[in-house]
Amino acid sequence: MACNFRGDDYRKGRNELVYKRVIVLFALTFLLFSCTRPSTVSVPDDSTIVSIESGQIRGTLTGEDSTVKMYRGIPYANAPVGDLRWKPPAAADQWSGVRDTAAYGSSCIQPEQSLVPEAAGNQSEDCLYMNIWTTGEEGDKLPVMVWIHGGGFSIGSGSQSLFDGTHFAESDVVLVTFNYRLGPFGFLAHPALSAESPDGISGNYGMLDQIAALEWVQRNISVFGGDPFNVTIFGESAGGVSVSYLLVSPLAEGLFARAIMQSGVGGTSTPLRSDGSVTSGEELGVEIAEELGWNKPESSSAEAAAALREVSAEDILDTANPRVGLFGKGRALGPVIDGRIFPQPVFEALADGEYIHVPVLIGSNSDEGTLFLRQIPIRGPFGYKLAVEAIFGEDAPDVLALYPTPEREETEERIAELITAASFTCPVQYTARLLAEGRQPVWLYYFSRAAPGLVKRDLGATHGSEIYYVFGNLPASYIDEVDPAVSADMQDAWVRFAHTGDPNGGNLPLWTDYSAENAVYMEFGDYPSIGRELNREACSLFESIFGWSY
């Protein structure tokens, strides 16, 4: 990073400014690409009444000709409040009569800067709700797609408008979205919480929520016309990371038949406890608890856990200060390697073959890094060179040879290229290769279509922009005549993958599965095309730097 001789106050002020700027950038991206749900009226209708394990629910009709049945705010687990805070999800309470599901349930608690419009003012610890779109009837056995939202395990919601599943349902898919606990509520590890667990572990409550949601799907989805034996899990960013973690969790065995990872794979993992060389999840939890005022080592574990559960949600969130964005300020809270839910880090498990062997679709975007530029306070060529030297150490000369110090006006573009390759393109390909070595089919994609509205803001095919194409929810004011065709090709490929485990067909050229030998990928640009050896030189370099083998 660039040298700073103005003291802590200056650094703090500058960092606050950078943080505010990146929040604005996130907001801009979400708003310019935020879409309205399909422009049809949702009509409550008794024909939508179904019986699930907790009771009867009534949905609404939406979509073209009101053929899609939509159910929102279905509790898939009990509210994780009071004594259930930092506990594995429990079964949802029963109810009598018919429960209306016209509205979404509350989103999980997250920072005010979450920029999820649907979560603003509608947050609660009582947030374990699910949403379903379907045209099916019981017995239809339609493929099921379960979407896991992103947001760095700190922000996001299954009720975001861009995740509206109407178009998927119109393609004979049962589409499911859901919330899971975030930040300190979903990922706080602490010795007192581990002590009360039969397995001696803590910290993966948000991931247990995801597993509970998939278990609920297994038990209930047939009444919506879904096939519990044909479930595809898919997600973007932290949602994609979640998919990679579920692939290596013994607890997720049998809960899904296919997996899609969009711009997110497992990477650096935090162990539950320290081995003397790393900071553990529990140590981070102790640090947070001390900042909350709980520092009584003479107390029992039960007393410590009870005291933590009495702290207000607002104080916990403010004190934990979960990180927002790839390079944001605050604490990075996410899955921990606990020996039971996740026996190994993702890459180690994949390399050892210790994962759930299913067909996988995986990929990234061409301009991922542009979204995170404002989180990096690098100014000019000199700052760029210093940052590369600080990050890569003795490998910096090799990185600078491939990504040379730019002219001043090109600094941000060069930084974005570096972030895109090192944090997305190359880890995604590495994951694809590990999976392919496990001898199940893997398809690699590369999304490079930049909508005009994003081009005007120098964002290109930035992080998360492919979601709108996959879901078919394109904002009319920021696209041109090319984008609907790109969206149709992508969603059709995702739907075919959910139906058969193979995305080929439609307007796509023949898309062979990925291997280290052929290194084939499908590029979704202005039109679909086949490529090979995506960013090979950079990926070879970064794998050697990070200890990977090409």
Image (tube, rainbow, N blue to C red):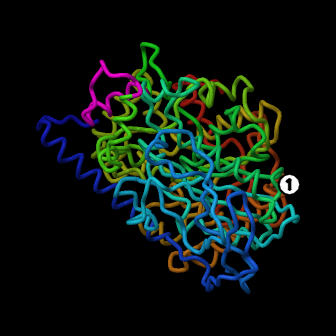
Identity of the residue drawn at 27% across and 26% down: 295
The kind of residue tagged 1 is Thr
Tell me if 135 is positioned left or right of 419 in this view: right
Whole-percent x, y for residue 21 in the image: 30, 57
Whole-percent x, y for residue 521 in the image: 72, 48
Q: In which quarter of the image is residue 461?
A: bottom right
Q: Residue furthest front?
A: 96
Front residue (pair 55, 357): 55
Q: Helix, strand or loop at disc 1?
A: helix
Tell me if 377 is positioned left or right of 156 in this view: left
Front residue (pair 493, 124): 124
Mark 1 is surrounded, within 10 Å at the Cα level, by few (under 14), some (14 to 19) or many (20 or more) other residues, namely few
Identity of the residue drawn at 75% across and 57% down: 220
For residue 284: magenta?
A: yes
Determine if residue 116 is in view: yes
* Residue stretch rendered in magenta on the structure: 282-302
Q: Residue furthest top?
A: 276
Front residue (pair 528, 154): 154
Whole-percent x, y for residue 111 in the image: 36, 53
In the picture, the quarter occupied by the C terminus is: top right
